[in-house]
Image: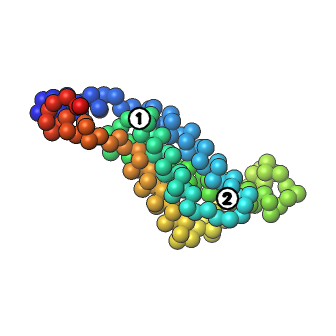
Amino acid sequence: MPSARRFLERLRQRQSLLRAFALGVPALALMGFLWGVVNGISGVPLEWLPFIGMGYMVGTSVRAAGKGIDRRFGVVGAVLTLLGCLVSRFLAVSITLGFQNPGLSNFTLLAEGTLGLRLRLLLDSTDWYNLAALVLSVCQGYYFARYRITPQEMSYLADEGPPS
């Protein structure tokens, strides 16, 4: 079993939490921006988008960059997915509020203390299907963020022979 331990140790040595954050944060920003703008401009709540897009994109970005096999990489993927979903919902509420007040610029809306109003609208617009989509998205972020040992690598661990 010494070669299996060496193999797992090599996998652990190549993982990087810093690289996972470095690629996960731009992925959450991109998906959060896209989802928030589309949701805010169209006025149609697209709650399936975080399930399909946010969790997958953030999770795979964390996995590709971090190459982590430990549970903490899944947690990073889940937390970044949650942040992306919250940012996008906040952006959608902000855009909707801006459309409802066409005479005011977003700077004016922010400067006059409407942050509390935006947060209140965010909470008021949250239904059970919003929460269900959020939970599914966070689960996807966790699932896709961790590196999975391939069947070839698994056979190497079981047989202690080189992968074919």
In x, y percent, where is residue 69?
A: 32, 39
* Image point (18%, 36%), residue name: 157
Q: Circle 2: is it few (<14), some (14-19), or many (20+) Cα within 10 Å?
A: many
Can you say whether 132 is above or below 160 in the image? below
Amino acid type shown at disc 2: Asn
User: In this rendering, does residue 111 appear at all?
Assistant: yes
* Image point (17%, 33%), residue name: 4
Can you say whether 8 is above or below 131 in the image? above
Q: Which residue is labeled 1 in the image?
A: 66
Q: Quarter holding the N terminus?
A: top left
Q: Is residue 47 left or right of residue 152?
A: right
Q: Secondary structure at mark 2?
A: helix
Q: Is residue 143 left or right of residue 151?
A: right
User: In this rendering, does residue 77 appear at all?
Assistant: no
Cα separation, mark 2 vs mark 1, equals 30 Å
Q: Secondary structure at mark 1?
A: helix
* Image point (59%, 43%), residue name: 29
Q: Is residue 45 left or right of residue 100?
A: left
Q: Which residue is labeled 2 in the image?
A: 39
Amino acid type shown at disc 1: Gly
Q: Quarter holding the C terminus?
A: top left
Reading the chain from its start, which is encountered first: label 2 or label 1? 2
* Image point (57%, 54%), residue name: 86
Q: Circle 1: is it few (<14), some (14-19), or many (20+) Cα within 10 Å?
A: many
